[in-house]
Image (spheres, rainbow, N blue to C red):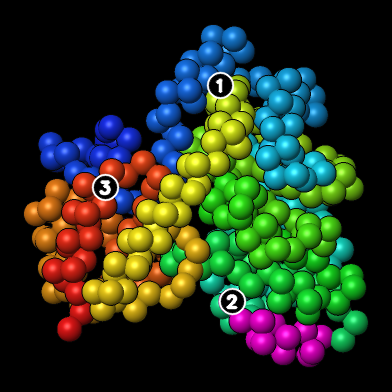
Amino acid sequence: MSPLPPPLQTEQRTYVRAKSRLLSYFAGCDYYRLSSHPRVLQALRTGLDRHGLSVSASRLTTGNHRAYGALEAALTEFFDAPTATLCSLGYTPNLIVAQALAGRFTHALLDARSHGSLQDAAQFLDCPILKFPHRDPAGLAELLQRLSRSRPLVMTDGLFSHDGSAAPLADYLALLPPEGRLLVDDAHGAGLLGARGQGALEHAGVPRDRIIQTLTLSKAFGAYGGAVLGPPELRDAILERSRMFVGSTPLPLPLAHAAGVAVRHLRAHPRLRTRLQDIADRFKADLRAAGYSLPDHPGPIVPIVPRDATDTRRWEQRLLKAAIHPPLIRYLGGPANGYFRFVLSSEHTPAQVNALRTVFRELAPD
């Protein structure tokens, strides 16, 4: 069994303490560091004092607290969505949707690199599961051409966390047959992509009438839990058919209260998004100038795959020398020996970004 990595203690929002050393932290997906924002932390304390810890019941019995409705209202306003249905975990929205819609589609068509929650959700749909090449409209088109009179559910991430790339949603929608639908796991795109932060749909310039958008609150919003955005009939189906939703206790009340504050804060402060975009754009431009071949992806994520174990050690040693935590990721389905995934945030200081830029320049490819 692979051991868990050593524990890290977050400090000063953009640092971690590891083995007594304070290191700059370019990892995780708390893109605006809202998990440590004073207003969000105060909301957590206020929620605990005002509401207690838990409703200790399903929302369909005696656990439908007003804090959940307030958070759902904040999400519908932020994303301009017809309804938002809160889920207790960020991993579960896709599974809840699949339970609600089981038997309604002839095929589940998954991007080959789709998130594990989408792959798990497909098992609930009660239909054949097929995969198409990663971010490849032509591959999806070829697959659809082989399926006669299909009613597919195309399933994809909105923003892929391994490299910051976005799904070509407009191309997928153009290929869908009339009864087809698109399920977009927008865990990383929600709050990050688009002029208003509404996610991969806004980034792609597509309407949501044939799209189900799911999200987590633990990334851009720095909180916890997840949600399903979609039409009223989808919400009705969830309440009627999803055992995972009906039979679970919703997220703790202080977290729901804090998440609502985080959502409203991000909506009221668009400068956070533009600041992060500026930081990411300048950083990527500098790396390209230093000889790195970086695709034009919208996410503030820069992956580096080491050539071998020696290369991995060289990067780790140089990062630690610069007082930067080495974000070596060993993730199910990723490179066998892991890879470095650097994630920029709106709260990193110029000095921190410059230190990371210096490391990249010193280790630039020949």
Residue 94 lies in what quarter of the image?
bottom right
Q: Residue at x 16, y 57 (%)?
A: 319
What's drawn in magenta, residue-wise? 135-147
Q: Amino acid at mark 2?
A: Arg
Q: Give the label, 1 or 3, closer to the camera.
A: 3
Tell me which numbered mark, 2 or 3, is placed earlier along the sequence.
2
Where residue 254 is drawn, which disc sits there?
1
Q: Nearer the viewer, mark 2 or mark 3?
A: 3
Identify the element where label 3 is drawn. helix
Q: CA distance from mark 1 to mark 3?
A: 34 Å
Q: Which mark is residue 135?
A: 2
**Above or below for 141 versus 309:** below
Q: Considering the image in quadrants, where does the C terminus appear? A: bottom left
Real-space Cα distance between discs 1 and 2?
A: 38 Å
Q: Residue at x 12, y 36 (%)?
A: 20
Q: Is residue 168 left or right of residue 11?
A: right
Residue 301: x percent and y percent? Answer: 40, 60
